[in-house]
Image: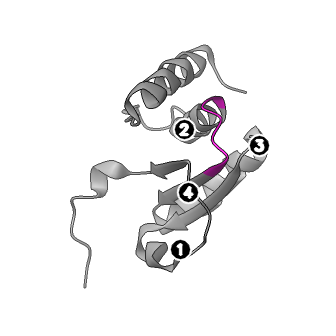
């Protein structure tokens, strides 16, 4: 499912995440960042993952999750609806997708 370069990034990303508590994936478009992030979460033994993305990306991420079949619970939500997450769940990992766009102001 994952290519050799993704497996390498999953291994190195997991090591960074466990060591520093943070990892930033800077990969080209269409190189499998979502599957790589899911692989890192799985390898890091996360149990509950909150995946924040743009609204148009939710369906794709849920599809990748279904393909990858990791061992953790996943909730995918868009940035605009993040305030609705009031679950008592303890999030082991929070993935901020499209993080390069976080500094942009949206339309009021």
On the image, the x and y values in percent for residue 26 come to 36, 33
Quarter of the figure with residue 21: top left
Of residues 103 and 14, which is closer to you in this image?
14
Q: Label 1's element?
A: loop
How far apart are the two marked residues, 3 and 2, measured between alpha carbons?
14 Å
Q: Is residue 51 depicted above or below 47 in this figure?
A: below
Task: Give the Cα separation between the discs numbered 1 and 3.
Answer: 25 Å
Determine the CA span between mark 4 and mark 2. Answer: 12 Å
Report the residue marked by disc 3.
67
Question: How far apart, in angstroms, are the residues tagged by discs 1 and 4?
Answer: 9 Å
In which quarter of the view is residue 10 placed? top right
Disc 4 crowd, CA 10 A, few/some/many (<14, 14-19, 20+)? many
Q: Which residues are magenta?
A: 43-48
Residue linked to disc 1: 85
- Residue at 74% x, 39% y is 68
User: How many numbered dots are placed on residues in this image?
Assistant: 4
Q: Main secondary structure of the magenta part?
A: loop
Q: Looking at the image, which residue is at 66% across and 25% down?
A: 2
Q: Which residue is mark 4?
A: 50
Image height check: is 86 above or below 10? Answer: below
Q: Are marks 1 and 4 in contact (CB under 8 Å)?
A: yes
Instruction: Choose mark 4 or mark 3, whichever is in front.
Output: 4
């Amino acid at each position: 499912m994952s290519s050799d370069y993704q497996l390498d990034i999953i291994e190195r990303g997991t090591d960074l995440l466990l060591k520093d508590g943070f990892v930033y994936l800077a990969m080209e478009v269409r190189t499998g960042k979502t599957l790589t992030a899911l692989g890192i979460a799985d390898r890091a033994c996360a149990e509950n993952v909150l995946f924040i993305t743009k609204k148009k990306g939710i369906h794709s991420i849920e599809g990748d999750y279904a393909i990858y079949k990791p061992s953790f619970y996943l909730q995918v939500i868009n940035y605009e609806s993040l305030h609705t997450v009031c679950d008592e769940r303890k999030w082991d990992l929070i993935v901020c997708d499209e993080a390069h766009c976080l500094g942009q102001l949206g339309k009021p």
